[in-house]
């Protein structure tokens, strides 16, 4: 994006928009990719950013849901989600042609790896959606350690194979790749100070990975999820503990330095 | 067409305010529209010293509402005056500070400092359910409430003094009267209703603080009733809030007796919600040929108005 195109978007009214649904397809059991086209001029999303998506038309459910940008092409935004609760169940029923109320892109983005450091991505479960555009952006430079509980929860393996420098897969039940968990695989991989680590996954996984990174003096970032109401920094609902007090996942994050959060 | 209303010494260009705690210090929403379109911006509660707030999870969605247990995380008085107030002052809207202390002396100190800093309004938060000291405790007892308001009253010279009441007050009419008798120039209500939610599988509460405050459309009928009762009990203006999602909701509060309304949780759902309410009220007035918004205040037609 050129600076002039950014400047052409007026301050105000840029991030709250209606979005036309282009497609909402199941890519794996209970896991869907929804593609939408913003009906207003918006900023192109950067890897790591997210959208708040309205999943109903009335007051129930009330709040929009946060979904990270999974992919982006020619103005179309893709999000990947697993059906888990009321909101995602409603989202599953959305059909092409419908219009959704959306806010975004929101939050900060993944930084590029510092010069001389090799990017390593550790992802767990559907959190692969957050790091997928980053891996794509890094154009074959990133090593990816991707794990889930079972193969049924693994998505985009072929695509990852094509865009990762090296892909290490693992599942807790051994149905895909090694029967192991991401922190163990990262240990085996030989994580070291020459790497720059990107982490996104369940809180338990992230906590274990952060511990390993600290032991190995590895720098990097972690993307966090938290319940949020507004997505723009007003409600203070999505606070995460940091060494300097609580910070908002939606505003100061969702991407934080590894040593910048207390999980 | 006149949409201006008076709240104590404050003259608002229209009756739409924001509810404290739902609008930050205005910065986030200024990205979406000119805050000068609002009658007033009521900012997030301020305490003397910065507060860290409660552990996560802090929010939980409920049917047609949400629970929050933020715990009044805020930057504290000093940073508010230095870093936050100048921002809101750029806009042609009334700036109202919401203040919280754990002792009357803290409320007085805060209110005096904010009054001297030129705030247009000071809203005493005696109704937050999410802090263990202060907050709601002051609203539970009319004598304590009257004493607190009286002390703050003596310290505030220029700003309009508003007292925000809790729906948990044993008698909302008595609480409103106590605030008025002690010198409040307006009462605002309601704050959130204390509630809780749990995870049945884990047998654990979902909020880090266990209990939180319920807001959103789920509480609107309760809020309307309490505004109706308070408006009948006091002669100072009542500011109504609780589940206002659109102009129709706001107009219902005005008919129930609110001279102004505050939009809260709706800001989270739609960032332009408050200004949408302003425009909706204007459109309603045009459609119905209503010349003055004040003509609608308390205009509910009831067979038995003796309440």
Image (tube, coloured by chain):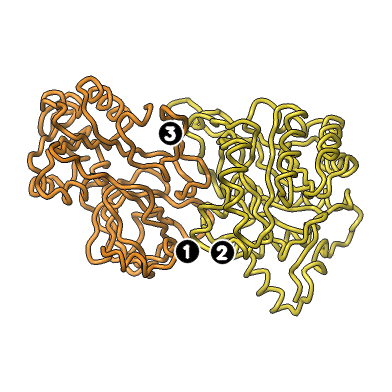
Chain colours: A orange, B yellow
Is B98 left or right of A53, judged from the image as shown? right
The quadrant of the rendering that contains the C terminus of chain A is top left
Residue ID for mark 2: B34
Q: Secondary structure beneath disc 3?
A: strand
Residue ID for mark 3: A240
Q: Position of residue B149 (x, y in %)?
A: 82, 37
Q: Position of residue B209 (x, y in %)?
A: 55, 28
Residue drawn at (69%, 57%) of the image: B94
Residue drawn at (37%, 50%) of the image: A89
Q: Look at the numbered discs 2 and 1 and tell me whether their residues touch, using CB distance below 8 Å.
A: yes
Q: Residues within 10 Å of mark 3 (few under 14, many from 20)?
A: many
Q: Position of residue A137 (x, y in %)?
A: 17, 51
Q: Residues within 10 Å of mark 1 (few under 14, many from 20)?
A: few
The quadrant of the rendering that contains the N terminus of chain A is bottom left
Is A65 left or right of A168, judged from the image as shown? right
Relative depth, front residue between A212 and B224: A212
Q: CA distance from mark 2 to mark 1?
A: 8 Å
Q: Position of residue B19 (x, y in %)?
A: 64, 50
In the image, residue A211 sits, relative to residue A101, either above or below, namely above
Q: Please determine if labels 3 and 2 lie on a single subunit.
A: no
Residue drawn at (38%, 27%) of the image: A262
Residue drawn at (59%, 43%) of the image: B82
Residue ID for mark 1: A12
């Amino acid at each position: 994006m050129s600076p002039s195109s950014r400047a052409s978007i007026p301050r105000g009214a840029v991030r709250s928009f209606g979005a036309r649904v282009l497609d909402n397809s199941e890519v794996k059991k209970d896991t869907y990719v929804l593609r939408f086209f913003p009906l207003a001029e918006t900023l192109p999303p950067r890897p790591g950013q997210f959208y708040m998506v309205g999943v109903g038309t009335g007051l129930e459910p009330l709040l929009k849901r946060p979904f990270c940008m999974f992919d982006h092409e020619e103005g179309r935004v893709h999000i990947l989600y697993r059906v888990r609760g009321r909101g995602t169940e409603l989202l599953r029923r959305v059909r092409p042609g419908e219009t959704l109320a959306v806010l975004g892109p929101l939050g900060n983005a993944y930084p590029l790896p510092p010069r001389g450091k090799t990017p390593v991505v550790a992802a767990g479960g559907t959190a692969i959606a957050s790091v997928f555009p980053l891996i794509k952006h890094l154009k074959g430079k990133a090593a990816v350690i991707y794990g889930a509980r079972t193969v049924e929860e693994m998505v985009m393996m072929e695509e990852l194979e094509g865009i990762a420098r090296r892909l290490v897969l693992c599942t807790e039940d051994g149905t895909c790749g090694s029967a192991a968990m991401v922190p163990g695989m990262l240990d085996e991989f030989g994580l070291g100070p020459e790497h720059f680590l990107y982490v996104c996954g369940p809180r338990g996984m992230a906590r274990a990975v952060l511990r390993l990174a600290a032991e190995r003096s590895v720098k990097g970032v972690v993307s966090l999820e938290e319940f949020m109401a507004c997505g723009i920094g007003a409600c203070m609902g999505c606070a995460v503990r940091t060494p300097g007090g609580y910070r908002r996942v939606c505003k100061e994050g969702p991407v934080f330095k590894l040593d910048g959060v207390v999980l | 067409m006149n949409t201006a209303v008076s709240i104590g010494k404050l003259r608002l260009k229209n009756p739409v305010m924001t509810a404290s705690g739902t609008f930050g210090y205005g910065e986030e929403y200024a990205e979406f529209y000119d805050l000068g379109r609002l009658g007033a911006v009521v900012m997030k509660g301020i305490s003397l010293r910065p507060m860290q707030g409660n552990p996560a999870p802090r929010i939980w969605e409920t049917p047609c509402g949400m629970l929050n247990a933020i715990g009044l995380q805020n930057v504290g008085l000093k940073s508010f005056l230095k870093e936050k107030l100048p921002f809101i002052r750029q806009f042609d809207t009334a700036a109202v500070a919401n203040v919280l202390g754990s002792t009357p002396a803290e409320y007085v100190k805060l209110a005096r400092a904010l009054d001297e800093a030129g705030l247009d309004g000071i809203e005493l938060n005696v109704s937050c359910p999410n802090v263990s000291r202060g907050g709601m405790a002051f609203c539970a007892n009319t004598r304590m409430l009257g004493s607190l308001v009286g002390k703050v009253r003596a310290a505030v010279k220029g700003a309009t003094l508003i007292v925000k009441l809790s729906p948990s007050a044993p008698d909302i009419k008595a609480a409103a009267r106590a605030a008025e008798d002690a010198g409040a120039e307006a009462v605002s209500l309601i704050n959130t209703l204390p509630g809780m939610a749990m995870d049945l599988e884990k047998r654990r509460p979902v909020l880090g603080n266990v209990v939180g405050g319920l807001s959103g459309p789920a509480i609107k009928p309760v809020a309307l009733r309490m505004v109706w009762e308070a408006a009948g009990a006091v002669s100072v203006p009542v500011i109504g809030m609780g589940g206002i999602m659109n102009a129709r909701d706001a107009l219902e509060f005005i008919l129930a007796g609110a001279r102004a309304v505050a939009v809260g949780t709706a800001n989270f759902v739609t960032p332009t919600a408050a200004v949408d309410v302003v425009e909706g009220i204007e459109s309603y007035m045009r459609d119905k040929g209503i010349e003055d918004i004040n003509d609608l205040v308390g205009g509910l037609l009831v067979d038995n108005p003796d309440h």
